[in-house]
Amino acid sequence: MVENNLTIGFTFALYLVVMLGIGVIAYKRTTNLSDYILGGRSLGPWTSAISAGASDMSGWLLLGLPGAAYVSGLSAGWIGIGLLIGTWLNWLIVARRLRVYSFKSGDALTLPEFFANRFRDNTQLLRVVSAIFILMFFMFYTSSGLVAGGKLFETVFGFDYTFAVTVGTLAIISYTFFGGFLAVSWTDLIQGLMMAAALLIVPVIALSELGGFSGSSAQILAENGDMLKWFTDASNGETLTAIGIVSSMAWGLGYFGQPHILARFAAIRSPNDIPAARRIAVSWSALCLLCAMGVGLLGTVYMARDLGDGETIFMVMVNAIFHPVIAGVLLAAILAAVMSTADSQLLVSSSALTDDFYKAMLRKNASQSELVWVGRFAVIGIAAIAYLLALNPDSTVLGLVSYAWAGFGAAFGPALIMALFWRRMNTWGALAGIVVGGVTVVAWAQASGGIFDLYEIVPGVIFAYIAIVVVSLATGEPTYEITEEFDSMKEE
């Protein structure tokens, strides 16, 4: 066992060295704030598509979703269906228009800056409020990644949970600090391909050893007859409610407001690359979601049913199936999933602090070099707070992600969609949508029972759209300059 741990540990160390090396290379190509935040808008279709998917799915894909399938069976798949539909619609509806509009509207580098430029908000109120919500929800989102990293090191090496979270945090900070967006995107491409390979290999081997589809299905049904039912929660045998199904599929609504995904759209080198990127992104997501469900379902009969934590099923199966060298590579895919999301979240949070607070409010004439270094040290500060949140060993990856996902989806999704496509929207409508969406998620999540069991993103999104329309129509029309810029988008 000790020898196995040493072998796996060496593989992990080698992987981390490669990631840090990429960070160093990106550091040499990062000369200004645009490079640090958006990589100079130079991403190709493969990098933008896979890095968007990898930064989106996170450790949730290799821990949370397999764990949910392991406990609840096929009924956990409604989340995956919602996410796949959301991925496709986000690339189809938002990607091209945001890429063009963010550049046309003052070359906006962040989502808050885009809102401020789009509505000519010289008070910076819209920008600051947007940045506050980004920082608040990303604390929970980044924390979920650190929890996943802690579970990885704890399960594989038997590390103390606190020590495990510390190791994972330091690893993520290292290359994000130096390389910025390019380092994050390049490493996400590698990490995304590793995630897909790991998720494909494990269920394929387990499936073959269990006798193929028919043999494994028979064993799963013998273990629990509800495991392969779409409308029954196998953990308790209860039929899913309409609220439960809607809540699961509503995860797809969250895509339109995730700043770390939207940053990839803005960073694509050309709008003409978007159709290819969309095909790559949807294919990658479909493969990973399907295989993650397969890991959880097959794990119920491939491994013992008495795992203390269902979210460790992928790690336990990898250790049981493979030689330590191969296991080290596949387990590094979990570290990849964790790092690919946490680094993106740290960077977006750092961007919000640097561009939307420091530059906009404190040092409007700060040099590019100064802004880059402020961004780097902001990464450390934000990571420290997320680290403190992650120290609770009872935290679940899925729970933390669901709250942050809903917060972003409701606060920014409706505001962005309407900003991109509604000519009459104004500053006050945008501000109302962001505040109402974000506050609704926080308030709804505190209640429970009956209608309040509905995933908080649903009422958050509905109320945000209503607020945007009502407040925009109740206040003054946008200026000629704003509408002229909006109308010019028809030519793009």
Image (cartoon, rainbow, N blue to C red):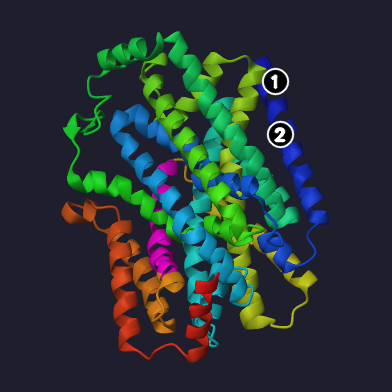
The reply to whether residue 309 is visible in this rendering is: no
Q: In the picture shown, does residue 161 fall above or below 215? A: below
Q: In the picture shown, does residue 348 fall above or below 311? A: below
Mark 1 crowdedness (10 Å alpha carbons): few <14, some 14-19, many ≥20? some
Provide the residue span drawn in magenta: 394-417
Residue that numbered label 2 is attached to? 15
Q: Position of residue 433 (x, y in %)?
A: 37, 73
Occupied quadrant, residue 167: top right
Q: Position of residue 307 (x, y in %)?
A: 40, 23
The residue drawn where x is 64% and y is 73% is 107
Residue occupying the far front of the picture: 491
Q: In the picture shown, does residue 346 fall above or below 331? A: below
Q: In the picture shown, does residue 459 fall above or below 123? A: above
- The numbered mark at residue 7 is 1
Q: Position of residue 442 (x, y in %)?
A: 35, 63
Q: Earlier in the sequence, mark 2 or mark 1?
A: 1
Q: Nearer the viewer, mark 2 or mark 1?
A: 2
Q: Which quadrant: the N terminus? A: top right
Q: Is 449 or 53 nearer to us in this picture?
A: 53
Is residue 242 found left or right of 18 in the rendered image?
Answer: left
The amino acid on which the numbered mark 1 sits, given as a three-letter code, is: Thr
Q: Position of residue 163 (x, y in %)?
A: 61, 39
The amino acid on which the numbered mark 2 sits, given as a three-letter code, is: Tyr
Q: Main secondary structure of the magenta part?
A: helix
- The numbered mark at residue 381 is none
The residue drawn where x is 60% and y is 60% is 271
Cα distance, mark 2 to mark 1?
Answer: 13 Å
Mark 2 crowdedness (10 Å alpha carbons): few <14, some 14-19, many ≥20? some
The residue drawn where x is 45% and y is 29% is 291
